[in-house]
Amino acid sequence: MNAVADKFRKDFPQVPERISGLVDLAYNLWWSWNPAAKMVFKQLNPQAWVESTHNPVRMLTELPEETLVTASKNPLYLRHYDIVMSRFRQELASRNSWYTEHFSHNHGHTIAYFSAEYGLHHSLPFYAGGLGFLAGDHLKESSDLGLPLVAVGFMYSEGYLNQHIGQDGWQENIKELLNRDASPIKRVMYNHDTQLVARVPFIDPPIYISVWRVDIGTIPLYLLDTDIKENDPANRMISSRLYTGDNEQRLRQEIVLGIGGSYILDILGIRPTIIHLNEGHPAFALLERIRENVADKMSFEEAYAHVQNTSLFTTHTPVPAGHDAFPHALMDKYFGGYYSLLGTPRETILGLGRAPQDPGGIFNMTAFALKMCAFRNGVSKRHGEVARDMWQRLFAENGTNVPPIRHITNGVHVPTWLDPRMELLFNTYFSPSCPNWLSEHDSPLIWEMINEIPDEELWAVHVQLKRKLVNRIREHKRRKWVSEGTDPINVVSGGALLDPNALTIGFARRFSTYKRADLIFQDMDRLKRIVNNRWRPVQIIFAGKAHPADDEGKRIIQKVYQYAHQQDFGGRIAFVEDYGEQMAQYLVHGVDVWLNNPLPPMEACGTSGMKASLNGVLHMSIMDGWWIEAFNGTNGWAFGDTVTGKNRDWSDAGQLYELLEREVVPLYYTVSNDGFPHMWVKKMKEAIRSTAPRFSARRMVKEYVRQGYDPALGFAVAGKKSNVR
């Protein structure tokens, strides 16, 4: 580790020795959820920090040497630098973590977490949406709690997609290669000057992978890369982009992730005691675990039982069509030499991937993972119910009436998604009673102190964040107009006319048909009356991407964009293009209301509303996903038809308009004699109080430890039947 750190310091000879720790800090995403660490970089040159898009590695490569020399001689800067670096090193070296304190009997064991995507920071575009951000928050919280966890994913050289909206409103996918040498990632070296390259074992035709590493606090994330000279052109493309629409290429991706990822851990000397699969994409890691155990002289039955009782599977997909499945003929093409290593006939292995709803000759990755993992969970209470109903026939074949699929509701990493201004405000009023409140933020008692904050101060911070959001959108469109000569009407539809004083609704997520981004446009005349109210104006900011192969999603984007063009909306409908982690931060901090109207029960959980509520943004949602658990009648609003199985768009839209006209808009614009909207702020406080502890990643990860990791490790250590089945 020190040799690697020394190598990267040598890559930045312009950084003076006195502040050379900046290089180590830049390559560890710990800085991304610690505001004081961000300030260490921002204080070097605020403009350079902005132009680097808050990427310290890129910033260090571009800063003039004299700027760094000046900082190394500035006593005020050095005082801040020394404090941050001391805390950074202490937290990375600390052994007094929650995990070691409560689970010391698990010392010496490793948990491997596999996911096809990770949402960590916008400088690393390895995510498509909520699944990735959930995985990223899981890793950050695992670091904060001291879990012995390593993670495996993909190095996507082209990311997911860079979105450009054309003049006609159609989404265009812009290819933009990741500059790996200006990103917080490191090559994993085989020796001092050669990057580790390995062949995915026992798979034909051969596929080679190189390995990169991202440090997330104490958690290493190993990224697999097939875009190397050892591969033929088709194989080089395996890791180029998330979620290819080509089924064979998808199979090759999942072979690389599951089998190749497991093999890389073995090469690195990491033999995990248990593994956790985030969705079905990496499920072939279970086959590789069986192969390893059979190679260690276990029978197939013994290997199966061991793998099953030491593996966890989290499913996120409530739609049968959303689960990956591959024809047996395609499986045979790649696994022809692999089946014989598993100690059982080919038919047995393929049978493990059989799902009752699929036609014969199909290997279903989710069905396989459900059978092969003793701990299985959905990601909200409602999703657990949906998953049990969806997979009832799978378990009924084994005589199980109620599928053993529980739920652990998702949560968000509070230090990442809580705005620093909000954190400073909470520090002022929480710290006198609880100096370490942020490290105990999953305790509901902490958040009872929210009522001690004066309404005026909370509202003032919210207004600041709202103005910051509007200014960010305006400046983005101004720069794009200057650099590209965009049609002025596109500047308007992109948010140039937004008013920071108007009630602002945010709708930002992946554009799939079931999320119904265009629901609010059902009755155009009524919506225009709401939006254009002279005394109580309302504006709506849309953002999000459609999957490159999802033309229906692209059509919804186009429709929203064309509505934003209409002059009679007065510039109060905006679509912000190329939505990513950075814009998500601005939106969940800065809008007044977060709108969510999926078609139930297709929202597995939804975490964007949690992030918004954490910052006092009021959630207005259909009763689906996490909101069923969270809504208490005073922390936001719920609407929608309770009847499923029919076209409910008009009914749901009608209730949405009614809610806006009768409750939301009047409440926002009702101010007391002192000029402040105290009733609105009261609702903001209740949103924060009720959301922050219950829907935090800290609560979530602790539940995974207690319900899944600890029992699985107990089985591995004791060699007896697990109690999680």
Image (spheres, rainbow, N blue to C red):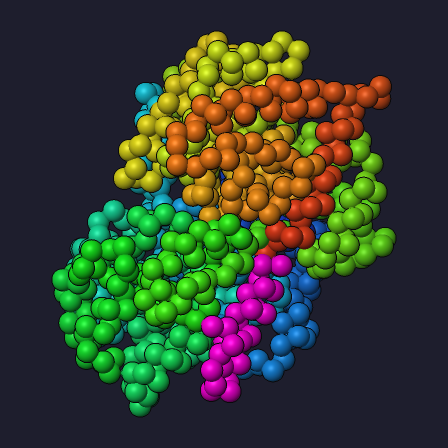
Q: Residue at x 37, y 22 (%)?
A: 559
Query: Does residue 623 appear anywhere in the picture?
Result: yes
In this rendering, position of residue 691 left or right of residue 187: right
Q: Is residue 715 magenta?
A: yes
Residue 485 position within the rendered picture, expressed as x and y whole percent measured from the top left: 38, 20
In the image, residue 592 sits, relative to residue 114, either above or below, namely: above
Q: Residue at x 17, y 61 (%)?
A: 361
Badge count: 0
Against 650, residue 240 (above or below) is below
Whether residue 497 can be seen here: no
Which residues lie in the magenta part?
A: 699-725
Residue 293: x percent and y percent?
Answer: 34, 83
Question: Looking at the image, which is closer to me, 282 or 460?
Answer: 282
Q: Residue furthest bottom?
A: 297
Whether residue 536 is situated above or below residue 415 in the rendered picture = above
SS assignment for the magenta stretch, majority: helix
Q: Position of residue 252 (x, y in %)?
A: 24, 60
Q: Tell me: residue 206, above or below residue 136.
A: below
Q: Residue at x 77, y 21 (%)?
A: 671
Look at 74% across and 20% down and name the residue there.
670
Residue 444: image location, x then y, percent: 73, 54
Q: Is residue 222 left or right of residue 336?
A: right
Q: Is residue 95 magenta?
A: no
